[in-house]
Amino acid sequence: MPEEPKKPRKIVPKKYPMPEQDPKARTKNFDEVPLGQDGQTAILEAQRCLQCKPGLNRKLCMDGCPVEIDIPGFIRKVQEGNFEEAIRIIRMKQNLPAVCGRVCPYENQCEGNCVLGRKNEPVGIGRLERFLADWERREMKKGKVQVPPSTGKKVAVVGAGPAGLTVAGDLAKLGHKVTMFEALQYCGGVLVYGIPEFRLPKEIVHAEVDYIRRMGVDIKNDHVVGKLDTVDELLQDYDAVFVGTGAGLPGWTGLPGENLNGIMSANEFLTRVNLMKAFKFPEYDTPIRVGERVVTIGGGNVAMDCARTSLRLGCKESVILYRRSDAELPARREEIHHAKEEGIRFELLAAPVEFIGDECGNVKQVKALRMKLGEPDASGRRRPIKIPGSEFIIDAQTVLIAIGQSPNPLVPMTTPDLRTTKEGTIAVDPEGRTSKKGVWAGGDIASGAATVILAMGDGKKAAKSMHNYLIGERSWPAPEVFEKLSCEM
Amino acid sequence: MNVEMQRQLGVMASAQSRWAGVLVTGRMRARMYEVVKSDKLTPDVIKLEISAPHIAKKAKAGQFIMVTPTEHGERIPLTMADFSPEKGTITIAALEVGKTTRELGKMKAGDKLFSLVGPLGIPTHLHQYGTVVSIGGGIGLALMYPVVRAFRQGGNKTVNIIGARNEKLLIYEDEIKSVSDEFYVCTDDGSKGHKGFVSDILKDLIAKGRKIDLVYAVGPIIMMKVIANITRPHNIKTIVSLNPIMVDGTGMCGSCRVIINGKTKFGCVDGPEFDGHEVDFDNLTARNRRYLPEEQVALRRWQEAK
Ligand SMILES: Cc1cc2nc3c(=O)[nH]c(=O)nc-3n(C[C@H](O)[C@H](O)[C@H](O)COP(=O)(O)OP(=O)(O)OC[C@H]3O[C@@H](n4cnc5c(N)ncnc54)[C@H](O)[C@@H]3O)c2cc1C
Ligand SMILES: Cc1cc2nc3c(=O)[nH]c(=O)nc-3n(C[C@H](O)[C@H](O)[C@H](O)COP(=O)(O)OP(=O)(O)OC[C@H]3O[C@@H](n4cnc5c(N)ncnc54)[C@H](O)[C@@H]3O)c2cc1C
Ligand code: SF4
Ligand code: SF4
Ligand code: FES
């Protein structure tokens, strides 16, 4: 490799552009919206990085990454054009780079800390990660992934979402025998049933899962823990158990008329479309239907995904109904931007009060109230206040409820000595240990609905703690610790 | 730039970083579920015995499975008509109403199913009630068999009433009879047993002042509604097994929501059995018609392709 000249570079203020599908064209298909950069652009982007040294009294990119990727290290290799080494550095910490490079909220994570980002745009760390993972998938040979000799220890991982996949990958890398139990027919959790194809093609998730399988992880799909083996039964066969069952329970408004036909939870809508591929009906058998106007209730990533999916399924107008203002929309900015580009109508400062049906039991209208913003609430966001007498009606043939998910209750329900908080999450200590000896938990089931990278961060911490337990002394925190945790939270 | 790097860049530029062409699918699956026996009970009811030892070991009366026959298929719920931990098999019986059930109807011994999840739902609450009158209609008879068997094993006196449109459509007759203390057959056309509805027999038993501690009903929605209306004024506890449209069957989507005593419940995790006096049957009927046009498209397309 010829030496690159080391003279001080001029700062390039903006990220190199990411080619994207045209907004008009893309609302007619389910193909990915950002198209990815080529190798030349990746090298140029990497060259924007200042290669900061850690240790000084300031936060750097890697401090913002929950899985502790050596960011300057891999970027250095990209600068040199050594993609193979660059992805190897990422892989040391990150089991799902192609996924995180797409859906990580990097603006608040690694890129949010980038030194360059104070005056200019930060280095495009997410898109570099994505580039390398895509490059690897295309270029590198597939085969068994090297793992160290077996330790003879057996681990069960329940739930194959980002948290479970991280634990499985990390423990397999350390030579433990991992078996993963997943309720659905495919692995990936929200990555396969929730996040739509145009943001995260399912083939990519399958490829990442395949990588973990090639590390020797045994994956058992169609296996609902709690209905088949319970956690207690797993503990008889395995040295340790990790629970990463996610926040799969849909939230409802509880308003009159919610059970009318045409009203669905975001989970039902997205599961039909993504997991069951209803967008390819009748090539795939699962049906889905949207009317002329689709109203989505909520303002997070899930709501954006619903609204944008509806457009692609052919509705004439897709409306987001959110009770606060634009500034409070909890979705990632990039998603909001994409949604607006595609022509989604934002009906802000409005909340539904009733769903009105026709004589056949189909929804036809949403009755809503205008809101205004008051004082900040506990979450720091300004509280929405109803404006009396401001009712208005929107016609809608489909209504999607995207107002949040809560923890999946099945495992806690069937594991009597697993302590939960009043929100229904499993109580864990900072290492991810639960009140039950030998059982760890992490991801959305422990934190409540959060993000892919935080679930992976939890998985990392738990894997470390599980490894210590497996090879060392099997001590466990006193029960009081969890008693405190479960009432505090 | 060295040669390797140029090669890498060339590839990237031409492939435009799209993932197309890199096909790793979810098809590499550890488990497949083999059909070990396939029978036709009537011209349009299929009975399949499927190898699924892990499910058979845990299954209980009243529980169901979600089956996806092929990779492109729909996930549909079917109740287990039988299960044998010893043989490691479960049995399902399906009325061939649409595309997916007809696809199952074509399955032969040795064929493999893409996905099978279970046992799901809350098992029938078994208890020594006393006299249990169980009523089944149509395909409900297959679902009813393991439940009445369990009632009997639990020490109840079992009065079983079964019905179908005509004699040829009566299924599981011998099996149910074998676990009955009292047994009645009805057909709409009178080709066997009483000519008329299963509800006639129930009304008759009530009119005769028979002591009934529980009524269990499974069959068409309208049948269950009629039964619940008959028992309500007499305050006879009535359990019905509902069949809302499901997607995952594990409590994740709410497709299966039903209204019970004014409250929303999920058929798959809170049910499928509920107190018949609390069910909003009209809402269930409306909700089960949600995808009629699409179901017809799927069926027509499948028939044409054959
Ligand atoms: C529509 C949508 C869009 C999102 N967009 C983003 C985004 O852009 N960026 C981002 O960072 N985050 C996003 N999120 C959030 C993110 O996907 C989740 O925080 C993350 O997936 C949580 O990971 P997890 O591993 O804890 O759980 P999950 O991904 O929920 O996985 C849990 C797995 O456990 C399985 N399971 C459950 N119960 C059992 C059982 N009893 N036995 C066996 N298996 C079981 C489930 O089937 C599932 O596969 C989004 C979420 C949704 C719903
Ligand atoms: C808990 C439960 C247990 C059941 N057990 C049995 C059984 O043992 N034997 C049996 O023959 N049938 C059973 N059913 C009904 C069976 O699931 C439907 O007949 C089947 O899904 C029809 O699929 P199809 O593609 O062949 O027909 P379609 O043409 O798709 O549908 C025909 C009708 O079946 C219903 N249906 C369609 N899709 C679904 C779905 N995903 N989930 C539920 N209902 C649907 C609708 O009312 C629809 O109008 C059960 C249903 C439930 C909820
Ligand atoms: S995993 Fe997420 S936070 Fe970490 S480097 Fe990648 S994009 Fe940034
Ligand atoms: S903070 Fe930004 S500029 Fe500094 S090393 Fe990290 S990515 Fe490069
Ligand atoms: S079928 Fe999805 S929650 Fe019951």
Image (cartoon, rainbow, N blue to C red):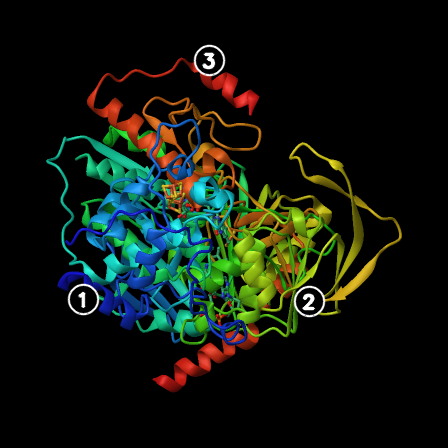
Q: Which residue is mark 3?
A: A480
Q: Which residue is mark 2?
A: A362
Query: Which quadrant of the view contains residue B79?
Result: bottom left
Q: Closest to the observer: A78 or A355?
A: A78
Residue beneath the point at 48% across and 39% down:
B126
Q: Which is nearer the eye, A333 or A190?
A: A333
Secondary element type, mark 3: helix
- Amino acid tagged 2: Asn
Chain letter for mark 3: A
Q: At label 3, which amino acid type do we have?
A: Glu
Same-subunit check for callouts 1 and 3: no
Q: Which quadrant of the picture is home to ligand 3?
A: top left
- For disc 1, does the CB lie below 8 Å from ligand 3? no
Q: Earlier in the sequence, mark 2 or mark 3?
A: 2
Q: Secondary structure at mark 1?
A: helix
Marks 2,3: beta carbons within 8 A: no
Q: Is residue B17 above or below residue A441?
A: below
Q: Judge from the rendering whether residue B167 lies leftward or rightward of residue A70; answer left or right.
A: right
Residue B283: percent from left, percent from top: 66, 60
Q: In the rendered view, tell whether residue B305 sits above or below residue A413.
A: below
Q: Are marks 2 and 3 on the same chain?
A: yes
Residue pointed to by mark 1: B7
Output the chain of dot 1. Answer: B
